[in-house]
Amino acid sequence: ESVKELVPFKNVGFKLQEDQTVLVEWECNEEIVLKYVMVYKGQDPGRMSKLDLVNHPEDFIQDDLSSIEEGVVYYRLKPNFEDQKQHYMSDLIKVEITKATSKGK
């Protein structure tokens, strides 16, 4: 009998808002008992730092990007489970900011 590894997230995405905040959202797999999600952020996918810890059942984080006129910001989610038997990191969430999306620029 094979053991299927559960992927903690069914849906991960973002919305760049008019006020230059980004809303990073995720949807959890119901079969997994999640304690919290650690959200990482960085402009270099190889050098990301902790942004915030989001307690379950919250499933989003808002981040102010108004200081960035142009460039790319990456986010990554690391879930922490009640039954911590596996380590998991989400795929990179890539948010592109252009002069056209920068407020008032």
Image: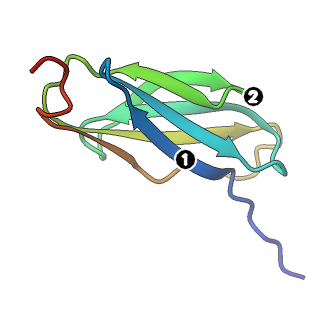
Query: Which image quadrant is residue 70 in?
Result: top left
Label number found at residue 66: none
Q: Which residue is mark 2?
A: 57
Decide which of 37, 103 is in the foreground and name it.
Answer: 103
The kind of residue tagged 2 is: Pro
Q: Would residue 55 be found to the left or right of residue 105 on screen?
A: right
- Report whether 5 appears left or right of 54: right
Identify the residue shown where x is 42% and y is 36%: 15
Residue appearing at x 74%, y 60% in the figure = 6
Is 86 above or below relative to 54? Answer: below
- Where does the image place residue 31, in percent across and percent down from the top left? 84, 51
Q: x, y (%) of residue 104?
A: 14, 17
Relative to 5, is 12 above or below?
Answer: above
Name the secondary structure under disc 1. Answer: strand
**Viewer can see residue 88:** no
Q: Residue furthest bottom?
A: 1
Mark 2 burial class by Cα count in 10 Å: few <14, some 14-19, many 20+: few
Q: CA distance from mark 2 to mark 1?
A: 15 Å
Q: Quadrant of the N terminus?
A: bottom right
**The residue tagged with tag 2: helix, strand or loop?**
loop
**19 or 55, nearer to the observer:** 19
Kind of residue sitting beneath label 1: Val
- Which x, y percent locates residue 103? 19, 20
Residue 93 vertical position relative to residue 67 in the rendered view, above or below: below
Q: Residue at (30%, 46%) from the top-left corner?
A: 46
Circle 1 is placed at which residue position? Answer: 12
Q: Which of 15 and 61 lies nearest the eye of the viewer? A: 15
Sequence order check, earlier mark of 2 and 1: 1
Decide if residue 68 is in sight here: yes
Could you classify mark 1 by the number of other residues whose Cα lies within 10 Å: few (under 14), some (14-19), or many (20 or more)? Answer: some
State the image coordinates of residue 42 (x, y, percent, origin top left): 31, 34
Where 17 sits versus 45, above or below? above
